[in-house]
Image (cartoon, rainbow, N blue to C red):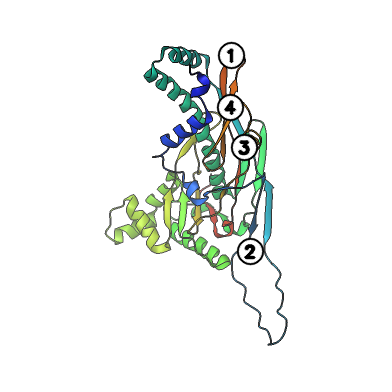
Amino acid sequence: MATIFDYVTAKEIAAYWIEAGSNRLPYLGATLFPGAKQLGLDLSWLKGSKGLPVSLKPSAFDTKPTLRDRIGFTKIVTEMPFFREAMTINEKDRQNLNNLIASGNQKAIDIVVGNIYDDAVGLIDSAEVVWERMRMQLLSTGKIAITENGNALDYDYGFDASHMETLETTARWSDLDDSTPIQDIIDWADVIEDDTGTRPTRAICSRATFQYLLNNEAIQTHITNLKLLPTEANVRRVIEEFTQVQIAVYSKKYKNAAGAATQFFPDNIFTLLPSGTLGSSVFGTTPEESDLMTAENVDVEIVNTGVALTTIKKAEVPVNVETVVSMIGLPSFEGIDNVFIATVHTD
């Protein structure tokens, strides 16, 4: 007769997660920092010197070539953080499942197993929340800070201070009468283009930040002069016509450790980005993947590029299955020099 160990396995949970998420839209950060996998714990990448090409030196015929140093390249190396959380089936669901298995009522078994799978899927989805928090911290502060569960980890990516600005007094976008957001965006894009040769084409902000643009007096005047309605679409259109920058309004939220709804991307920040990807969401190798793939009474599946989903059979009383979700990961940020972060309002 089948047992709880036959129904609650990493392979079955992974298949359930894939099916449940087939229509799920990816987080914005996942499109900017696509997933990548590597062995080990260390993350490394080469940070270029602002991307501008250097002129080739002239040379005489029949002479040895001049050797060029790799000037302006810094190799970034850091150890990636480790995340792990586990859960067991509660006693009520375990007893219900045991009784249903004995009765042979497959429809009822599927309902209870589905509830168990949903809890496990919640752990996997939490791993993606961690990723989006890290990616959006990078794009709003240039750093990553992880302060939960007794851990305090800080990752400083060396963001160029000249590619950040905090607006003050009447320049703040909350000053709807006197601020000049369109000119600000053009100026920030000029800074990146002057330094790197690449001009930003996109921007990210929250809905509250976009409201400053929607209600700005100068922007409203442009819209009126064009005989357009003062809609969000027309505000985007006017800004893009002047700046060649498309704005993504991103106000997706998650629940923090205290259970409060929190935005991934904060209010009052406006970040300019180049086209294309900015880096990678780099997964390392977890202990479960490294050491438990062939262990007895343990089932390990890798989902979402590098998240280890592990089920462990507990044969002692109470008989149970422990589900563990773990990952090692940190974003690389090869496009760091092509990003501008502006704080458009401070209290």
The span from disc 3 to disc 1 (Cα, nearest Å) is 26 Å
Between disc 2 and disc 1, the foreground one is 1
State the residue in front, 347 or 278: 278
Task: State which quadrant residue 162 falls in.
Answer: bottom right
Which residue is found at the position 37% from the left and 20% from the top?
107
Mark before the other along the chain sequence, 4 or 3: 4
**Sequence-first tag of 4 and 2:** 2
Residue annotated with mark 2: 49
Residue position marked by numbered label 3 in the rendering: 289
The residue at which mark 4 appears reads as 86
Label 3: which secondary element: helix
Identify the secondary structure beneath mark 1.
loop
Kind of residue at badge 3: Glu
Crowdedness near tag 2: few (<14), some (14–19) or many (≥20) residues, C-alpha within 10 Å: some
Asked whether 259 or 83 is in front, the reply is: 83
Query: Is residue 19 at all visible to an observer of this figure?
Result: yes
Asked if one can make out residue 260 in the rendered structure from this viewpoint, the answer is: no
Q: Nearer the viewer, mark 1 or mark 4?
A: 1
